[in-house]
Structure formats: structure tokens, C-alpha cells
Image (spheres, coloured by chain):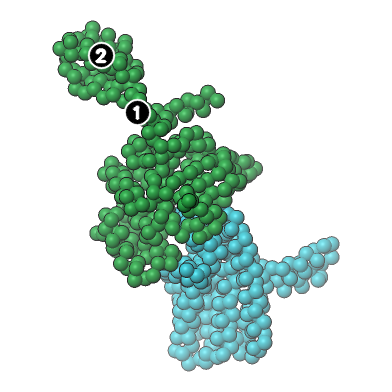
Chain colours: A green, B cyan
Amino acid sequence: MSPNAIEARALHKVFRTGFWMRPVEAVKGVDLTVKAGEIFGFIGPNGAGKTTTIKVLTGLVMPTSGEAWLNGLPVSDPSSRAKLGFLPEGTFFHDYLDAREFLDFHGALLGIPRDVRRERIPKLLERVGLAHAADRQIRRYSKGMRQRVGLAQALIGEPDIVILDEPMGGLDPLGRKDVRDLILSLRDEGKTVFFSSHILEDAEVICDQIALILSGEVRKQGYLEELLGQEVVGSELVVEAISESLYHELENRARRAVVQGSRFLFEFDGETDGEKALDRVRESGGRVRSFVPKRKSLEDLLLEGLAEEKKA
Amino acid sequence: MTSLRRIGVLALNTYREAVRDKLLYNLLLFAALMIASSILLAQMQIGKDERIYRDVGLGAIAFFGVLIAIFVGINLVYREISTKTVYTMLSKPVRRWEFLLGKYFGLLSLLAVEVALMSACFLGVLVWKGSEFSGGLVTAIAMIYLELALVTAIAMFFSSFTTPYLSAMFTVALWIVGHLLSDLRAFGRYTDIAGLRQMLEALYWTLPNLERLDFKSDASANVPISAARACMAAAYAGLYSLILMSGAVVLFQRRDFR
């Protein structure tokens, strides 16, 4: 049986901070199992422990206890990173280099022969949309361009596992779409993609599996269908030209009602309430602009997790 | 891929980063100006022209070399960590000791080029003024280079676990003390304060004794330098640098990049 692409067992990390070396537990017993060829989303709010866990997986931080493996090799062994591509959070690169030199340097560090690098770099730059700026110093790049050159750097060694820490952070909608498309294309090539994000919509669109981390602990992990289910948990109705009395009737039934100029938006719990409201609007001659049954979202899952944490 | 190749790749990139640093060129310009100023200084003295060319030339090579080793060197290591560029390197199959040695050898290459450039400037002054470029001067310059290698190892040692400001402070302090160890030891021999003599004696034997590598006065005064003395000094610098770099590796190995 082939090993999991990424595995972590009971990972703990305690940092010592400040003058008195006060212990801060950043990661508290994280278990992860990521199968090869999947897109795995590591979801959680800022400060939840996503980046620390990723740094343990990439050898930048030593775990206080617990173990982790990449392709079956312990992360303490540098050769576990031979087939790893990593994009750190933020875009901190050698900005005195141009994109071509930067990729050449990282390719050389991986031991890729010069002629292969020469062939691979233009293709990679084309793939991330930077062919036109290949000879420009990275310090002259925009944030989006830096993110792209970072992605190219992560892919220079044709890795089996790609770990991306907040790859959509700070990108405009077009940039986010490009990154999503790139992640999907990597899965099509058989690569395992593990990415962290606090932008839940992106994760929901592209992930096979997710893990939800809160305060250093993985609270939920599994396939999206299992975690979110197919059940409709609510509905959203947008209508126009309804009477004031009908508005108040629907407002009383809805979880939330919002007036948007001439339009009225109502959110209902479950599917039935929404359908009944829809019938009432039609009967009264009002205009229905949209009716969307809503399934449980990652946002709901996160909010549930946060609520449980608050209770505990 | 072998460790040697990875170290080479890292050294080349370090060298490339340093030669794109404007601070380096400013320091080199000042060094060249100082070496050239020996011509003016010589005109103010009578009959000691050659000695002044040599003293000022060797002094400038040593002083600006140390400035470059400390300020460019410390920055190069610390910047990799503070700007987080180290993340993309150490997340590859690069061992931490390879990273540190890559930085160290990159800096040594830079210092070699920088000492060569300043020496060429020094040679230019000597040739222009018809003064002899003796073997002693070559030995003195080689020892300056070894001193720079040792100072770089001190800087790397401190910057492997502390901030650039503290690293620079500690390195400058050790550089100054390293040139005063004989005086401190002599002072200890004449003192009556209990324990001070033993402490200064211990410091004399443990801190880097940079006076051992100082051949400038002898070379300037055309005093013959024995091969045995030069070899001993070179071995001392090599061994001390090795110990410091080993310490830096041990400390860097345990470091978390947060």
C-alpha cells in the first residue's frame, strides 16, 4: 500500500515568547491524513495554527512532540522535501533577482540540471502568466505577480506534493480564480495539493477534503460531502413589488429580512418555510427575482466550530 | 545532489546578493580614497614615503575589509531570516548546515574579490610611486584575508541566534578585544585585584587572538616573516573559524523560523 502523501500524528508545538519565555501552545495535538492526488484545504481563522502546522511539515519549525511524514518519510529528514513544492504565506522572495534568476536558483538548489532548468523555466513563467516580466527584478512586481512567481518557484521541481500557505491572500478576484484553476490543474496532473486558507468560498469550490483547525486543534476533518451533507439547511428569497403587510408577514417568518432599494431579501431556516413564502409572493402578485435553497457551507461549519469552542 | 553542490549554489547566490548591495560599493570607494590619500600624507612627511604608502594601504584593506565582513556579512544572514526568504530555501532538501556554509563561502568569495580590488589599488599606488611590492606585503594581505574569514565566522556565529544589531555589537567588540589581548594579559600580570589576572589569562587563551594574524607592521617595516609563523597563524585562523562555524551550525539547527 502506498503511503499517504502527508500524515501528522499528535503534533504539538509550544513557542517560548517574550522576556520571561512564556510558553504559547500554537498547535495542540494535530492529526492529519492527506491522500495522494487530492486537494486538501486546511481551514481556520487567523492565528488558529495553520501556518505553524505547515512550517512543521516543511521543516521550518521543529515539533515539540508528535510526528509528521511526507510521502512516508519523516519531516525531520531533508530528503522528505525532495518532491515538495512550497509557497510560504506572504510573498517574501529574493527581490534583487529577476524571475528567471529566481527560478534558476531554486531549480539549482533542487539539483535540476542546467539544460532542464533552461527548458522548464519559460514554460513555468508562461503557465503562471509572467512570461512578459521574466527579466524584471521581483522588487518591481505587484503583489499578485509576486504570488505568481512564488507559485512557479513551488513548481520548479515538478513536485508530488504542493503545500501552499494562504495562496489567495491579498489577491484580486481574477488572481484568486487563476490560483484556483492552477490548483485544479495540479490535481489533474496527479499532484497532492495541501493549502491553507481563511477564505472559505475558495476552499469550498476546489477541495476534496478539508480540516478545520481552531485554537491549534483540528476540530473536523473529512470529505466535503460528508462534512457538509446534501441536506438543504436554509433558503434565500429575493422579491419585488410586494405589499407592506406581506413584507411584515414574511419578515416574521424569516430568520433575516433586508430591504435593498425596491427589493426585499428574506433568509429562511430549512427549505419548507422558504417554499411557503415563495407561494405567498406568487399568490399576491409580487415578482420573484430569485429563490436559492442553501446547503450547509464551510462558513456554517466554521461558525459551528467557533460556537462549540465558546461553549467549552 | 551532493551537499557540496548545494553549498556552491547557495554561495553563488550570496555572492550575487552582496555584489548588488550599494553599501559594498560605498565602502570600496572609501577604501580606494583612503589608499590614494597615502600619497598626500606622504608629502607631509620627510623621508618616510614608502612606509606611509604601506601603512595606510594595509590599514585601509584591513579596516574596510572588516567593515564589509561585519556589516554586509551580518545583514546577509539576518536578512534571509527577517525577510523570510529562508523559507523557500530550507523547505527544499537543503540541510541547515549547508545553508550556513553556503552563506559563509559566499561571503568569503566576496571578501576575496574585495581584498583583491583594494590590493590592486594599493599596488597601483606603489607602482606609481616606484615603491617595491614585497613578499612580506603579500603575506600581510593574505593574513588580513584570514582575519576577515575569522571575523566573518564570528559574525555568522552571533547572527545564527541573535539580532543584527547585537551581532554587530558583539562582533565589533570581539574584533577590538582580539587586537588588544596581549595588552590585557600584560595588564593582568601587573594587577593586584584578586581573580582579574586569572580571568584575563583565560580570556587571552579563549578569545580569538587577532594579533597573531597581524603582519602589517612587519611587512611595512620590511621585517622578514618566517613561513613557519605564517603557517601557524593560518592554522590558528582556520581552526578558530571551524570551531565558530560548528557552534553556529549547532545553534542554527535548533532554530525555529516563526
Looking at this rendering, what residue extends furthest in the left direction? A285
Mark 2 element type? helix
Q: Which mark is residue A277?
A: 2
- Between label 1 and label 2, give the one nearer the viewer: 1
Q: Quadrant of residue B25?
A: bottom left
Looking at this rendering, what residue extends furthest in the front direction? A1
Q: Residue at x 34, y 49 (%)?
A: A187
Residue A109: give x, y in percent of width and height: 44, 65
Q: Amino acid at mark 2?
A: Ala
Q: Residue at x 56, y 86 (%)?
A: B137
Q: Is residue A229 left or right of residue A284?
A: right
Q: Is residue A104 left or right of residue A277?
A: right
Q: Which callout, 1 or 2, points at the residue further toward the start of the chain? A: 1
Q: Is residue B93 above or below residue A166?
A: below
Q: Residue at x 30, y 16 (%)?
A: A272
The residue closer to the viewer here, B105 or B44, is B105
**Pointer 1 residue:** A230
